[in-house]
Amino acid sequence: RQGAAAGAEMTGSNEFKLNQGPDDSISAVKFSPTTSQFLLVSSWDSTVRLYDVGGNSMRMKYQHLAPVLDCAFYDPTHAWSGGLDNQLKMHDLNTDQDTIVGTHDAPIRCVEYCPEVNVMVTGSWDMSVRLWDPRTPCNAGTFTQPEKVYTLSVAGDRLIVGTAGRRVLVWDLRNMGYVQQRRESSLKYQTRCIRAFPNKQGYVLSSIEGRVAVEYLDPSLEVQKKKYAFKCHRLKENGIELVYPVNAISFHSIHNTFATGGSDGFVNIWDPFNKKRLCQFHRYPTSIASLAFSNDGSLLAIASSYMQEQGDISHPADAIYIRQVTDAETKPK
Amino acid sequence: MAESEAEWELCKENIQPLRRGRAISALHQALQQQEGSSTALNQQKQAYETELRMYDGDDPLDVWDRYIKWTEQNYPQGGKESSLTILLERAVMKFTEEKKYHNDARYVDLWIRFAEGCLEPLDVYCYMQAQGIGTMQASFYIAWSEEYEKRGNSRMADSIFQDGLKCGAEPLDKLQQFHKALQARVCRQMMAAVVDKEKVDDEPQEPQRISLVELKAKGKKKAAVPINRVAGSIGFARGLQCTQPLGPVKNSRLMIYDENKEHFDPQEPKVESWMAPPSAKAKENEQRPDKWTNAKLPQKSRFGHTVVVPPPKPNFQPFVEESDQPPAVTPCKINPAVNTVLSARKPRREEQTPLKRLQERQHHMQLQQEDESKSGEKSMYCKELLFSGATEFSFEELRTERYRQKCIQRLEAGRSGRNSQEHSQSS
């Protein structure tokens, strides 16, 4: 890895910038489920790219008809993606073959895979979540949500859906006949991102106004008492507090700690059990649009990419950084 | 076609009436969509929402106006999912500072519809007048006057028209026409009341039953149904052809306006005294609460003699909020959705009427700039754009619209480029 990264632009002793990045904003970065070698990246330039992180090179890319909003690995050799063209694509990374699996009635905002139930999940602005059988592949059901879907995450066999109007719905992927829990976000402002704890106990929800909530799935009073929220991604400038959206969350699969990325360009790592911040990295050139820990928790992919939060204005170049993280940075103390 | 006509016949009780009527095609469509998915509806709604945000012409009210009209037509039941009330409130608030719209017929119309949805429309009309919104529009005075008339205050209703005429509201002939109609209605009511009174004086005063009232508008001979009813169960009739208060019920507060007796102050309309008493809506079979504590069952002690129970403490268990003492909950897997722990919805402040919000907002706007420079927070994103419509938007949705516009521009540019090429080739 060291040798490969030598040709790359190092942005720190343990961090480098990925070559051949997308031509437009980055919408999502996802590591392969089995190795920290491969990174999938979807972009507003209508492409999905596969990077060899170790070799710091692009291995493959495929096209959508319009910008891609999210992507996910089904297995190490299959990528799924969806975006503004309403199409859900499956791409075989071995043969470089495209399959259009199905469509939504509006742009697809999120794509996730649930290994427990072996099903792909998509959420869309058409106010629905659709399930897809990845083997056939075909549609396995459409489930209406009360509002446009903005984010979703899988916790074991449960699906947590965050929609417009600050709603949170918890579905049981084994029995989609009814909504298991209907919640309201405990944060006051729009939901930006939801990610489930790897231990499946709960989830973390971030809002557009510099705040993050730690929530638990068990509805019993005792467990619910443990939930909390905190402020972050705020900068003081001339006595005014600048409040930034928190766009990205990623969990460390082993330690159950998580990283958050905000439009302030900072990445923080948090210990949810001791309610402590473990570390903060240097400031990245522009908004953090997406974050991903590798499966073994050794690498963090950081997409620094302006999301037009303040309108269509000029901004620093978009880039993906790969950072080696240590236990000191990610392990609860 | 016949089928679909039958269809709207079947559910017409769920269709809210509109002043301007409904387009039958929109109605059919809306009713059909209810059963199936409402994808098309949602898409159209989203399109309007984007237009609200992306509009950069000089008549932003136009988008709101079209959006609201479309909503009215396509959500015939009204209700929450139409979000009509939110839309009206937002639209109305958005342009309070825009002087150019203050006497725009569309804007005034939005205000009137907004007022009609409020609990206290009169307050809203007063506010409008104070702000100078609609003061040159006949429709404003008509709506205001109608509100007073609805409450039976025909005197104020009339004076509103006078105001309108004084201000020279447009169109004048419409205003006059409605004014005359009001006067005619009031006259007719007066006459009816007088005739009724005379007639009632002749008749023997026996309890008589008026169900659903208004058998005849002009009080001729009424179908008197002589039914002997128990004193306690007789309600009293409403309406202007009201007979004398019957039985023991005294509704001295219900008074009929008499223009010869000008004794109450026009500045404080006694609408309340009109509204309150006949609330029983002439219900039949209603039991008057009688004294039941009289019916005493002598309590006997174990020893056989009567015990007088001292009554100071209530012998029932006072109701205690469940949350105060959590009962031992048996773990229930069937429907955890009912659990209240998860719904963090705080009880809404009830006193927040739309009008209050409006005034607060104005006050807030004044303070905002000072506020921001002081200890305030500043949101580092285009908050206005995300939340300006009836539903919220995310950055990605806004960006999608920008992307689409750029695509269209590129397409058009390409087309015109090709056209000019062809043109030059042909010449």
Image (spheres, coloured by chain):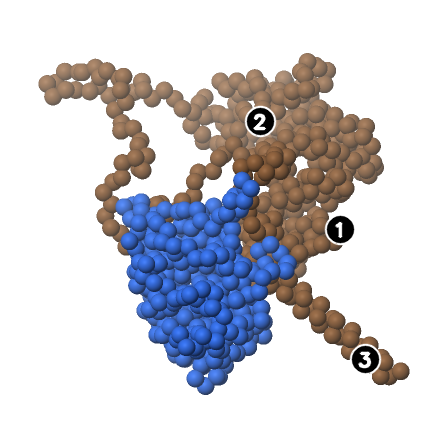
User: How many neighbours does mark 1 have within 10 angstroms: few (below 14), some (14-19), or many (20 or more)?
Assistant: few
Say which residue label 3 marks: B421
Determine the residue positioned at 76% across, 29% down. B161
Q: Tell me the amino acid under the disc marked 1.
A: Asp
Which chain is rendered brown in the image?
A: B
Question: Which chain is displayed in blue in the rendered image?
Answer: A
Distance (Cα) linking label 2 and label 1:
45 Å
- Residue B275: mark: 2
Reading the image, the residue beneath label 1 is B58
Q: Amino acid at mark 2?
A: Met
Q: Is residue A265 above or below residue B376?
A: below
Q: Badge 3 local density, few (<14 within 10 Å), some, or many (20+)?
A: few
Instruction: Using the rendered view, name the quadrant where residue B292 is placed.
Output: top left
Q: Residue at x 45, y 81 (%)?
A: A92
B115 or A61: nearer the viewer: A61
Q: Is residue B338 above or below residue A9?
A: above
Q: Earlier in the sequence, mark 2 or mark 3?
A: 2
- Can residue B41 be seen in the rendering of this structure? no
Question: Tag 1 or tag 3, which sits nearer the N-term?
Answer: 1
